[in-house]
């Protein structure tokens, strides 16, 4: 029996499941599903049983807290429970709160500063390490760039906080030795977000670089050899071969970095505590203060929902704008 004939018989209900000697029709299959006597049913049941632990984990870790947060955001929470239903009152109060709006603006500025720098320097490092001209000790440097990713962000924040210290910090000591004016860094309202962005880029550079390196290794060398024969320069090879073929990795890195930077809490909290004058206060820090400093759980839940909607909208927008069909 040919594959086409087998397909027609299956659709007509006259063929049996794979490995079965007896044919079964639609009626027999339904009866088998009900009685548990068919191979297809047993295979499906095994598949569901294998995925059940993961499904339970996802429901407990993600869906139940998400549902609880949504319910909490429309109730007037108090220490005894959910409280009365107040509708969208928490959202209205949140969006009219100048401190939340400032946190939202700070978060977007921090993302705009951090993500482009992370992508640019990670791509630059990946190109250097995957250059056709072998650099001496490149594996050692590659490991060094990746090392900050496995270091706790708390430790990163403390080290960089000392380096940015206006009085005893390393950076101002270097500026003084060069005869340049000292900077406020984390104590300056205009410099605190760029300083935090530098810390973020340093910590996240290795992750993005590894993804770009994997993408570069997947590009066939034949393209570069053919373009070299046609007289293409290194820049032309990058522009017309490397960059288009790196589009999937580029989209992935940008989306992940935007999500991570929008959710950043450790660095602003430990290095600057949201200051000075709330200049480094982010949305996640606002959620933390509302929930655990002032016990405004409903407000914190509403802020979490707003942040989720913002991340979802930006992710969908990036996928639509940046994704391109790659043809080899």
Image (cartoon, helix red, strand yellow):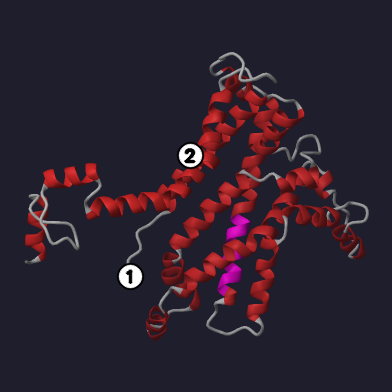
Label drawn at residue 39: none
Where residue 293 appears, as percent x and y from the top left, is: 76, 30
Judging from the image, what secondary structure is the residue with disc 1 in? Answer: loop
Q: Is residue 87 left or right of residue 94?
A: left
Q: Give the labeled residue for mark 2.
A: 313
Local packing at callout 1 (Cα closer than 10 Å; few below 14, some 14-19, many 20+) is: few
Residue at screen point 74% across, 45% down: 268
Q: Earlier in the sequence, mark 1 or mark 2?
A: 2
Where residue 201 appears, as percent x and y from the top left, is: 67, 57
Residue at screen point 79% across, 47% down: 271
Magenta includes 266?
no
Q: In the picture, residue 209 is in which quadrant?
A: bottom right
The image shows residue 125, relative to residue 89, as above or below, that is below
Specify start and end residues of the magenta stretch as a single range: 116-127
Where residue 259 appears, as percent x and y from the top left, is: 56, 47
Residue at screen point 72% across, 47% down: 266
Q: Give the labeled residue for mark 1.
A: 328
Of residue 102 and residue 62, the one placed in the foreground of this image is: 62
Secondary structure mostly seen in the magenta stretch: helix
Judging from the image, what secondary structure is the residue with disc 2 in? Answer: helix
Magenta includes 121?
yes
């Amino acid at each position: 029996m040919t594959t086409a004939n087998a397909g027609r018989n299956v659709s007509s209900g006259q063929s049996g499941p794979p490995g079965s000697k007896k044919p079964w029709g639609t009626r027999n299959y339904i009866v088998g599903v009900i009685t548990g006597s068919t191979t297809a049913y047993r295979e499906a049941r095994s598949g569901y049983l294998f995925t059940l632990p993961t499904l339970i984990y996802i429901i407990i870790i993600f869906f139940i807290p998400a549902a609880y947060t949504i319910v909490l955001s429309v109730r007037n929470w108090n220490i005894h429970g959910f409280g009365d239903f107040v509708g969208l009152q928490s959202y209205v109060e949140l969006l009219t709160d100048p401190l939340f709006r400032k946190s939202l603006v700070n978060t977007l500025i921090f993302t705009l500063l951090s993500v482009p720098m992370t992508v640019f320097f990670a791509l630059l490092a990946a190109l250097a390490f995957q250059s056709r001209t072998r650099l001496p000790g490149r594996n050692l440097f590659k490991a060094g760039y990746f090392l900050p990713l496995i270091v706790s962000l708390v430790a990163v924040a403390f080290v960089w906080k000392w380096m940015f210290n206006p009085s005893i910090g390393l950076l101002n000591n270097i500026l003084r030795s060069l005869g340049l004016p000292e900077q406020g860094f984390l104590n300056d309202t205009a410099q605190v977000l760029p300083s935090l962005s530098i810390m973020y880029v340093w910590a996240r550079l290795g992750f993005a670089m590894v993804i770009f390196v994997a993408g570069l290794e997947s590009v066939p060398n034949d393209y570069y050899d053919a373009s070299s024969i046609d007289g293409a320069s290194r820049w032309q090879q990058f522009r017309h071969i490397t960059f288009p073929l790196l589009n999937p990795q580029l989209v992935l890195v940008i989306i992940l970095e935007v999500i991570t930077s929008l959710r950043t809490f450790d660095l602003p909290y430990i290095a600057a505590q949201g200051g000075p004058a709330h200049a480094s206060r982010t949305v996640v820090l606002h959620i933390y203060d509302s929930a655990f400093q002032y016990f405004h759980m409903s407000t914190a839940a509403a802020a979490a929902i707003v942040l989720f909607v913002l991340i979802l909208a930006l992710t969908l927008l990036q996928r639509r704008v940046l994704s391109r069909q790659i043809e080899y």
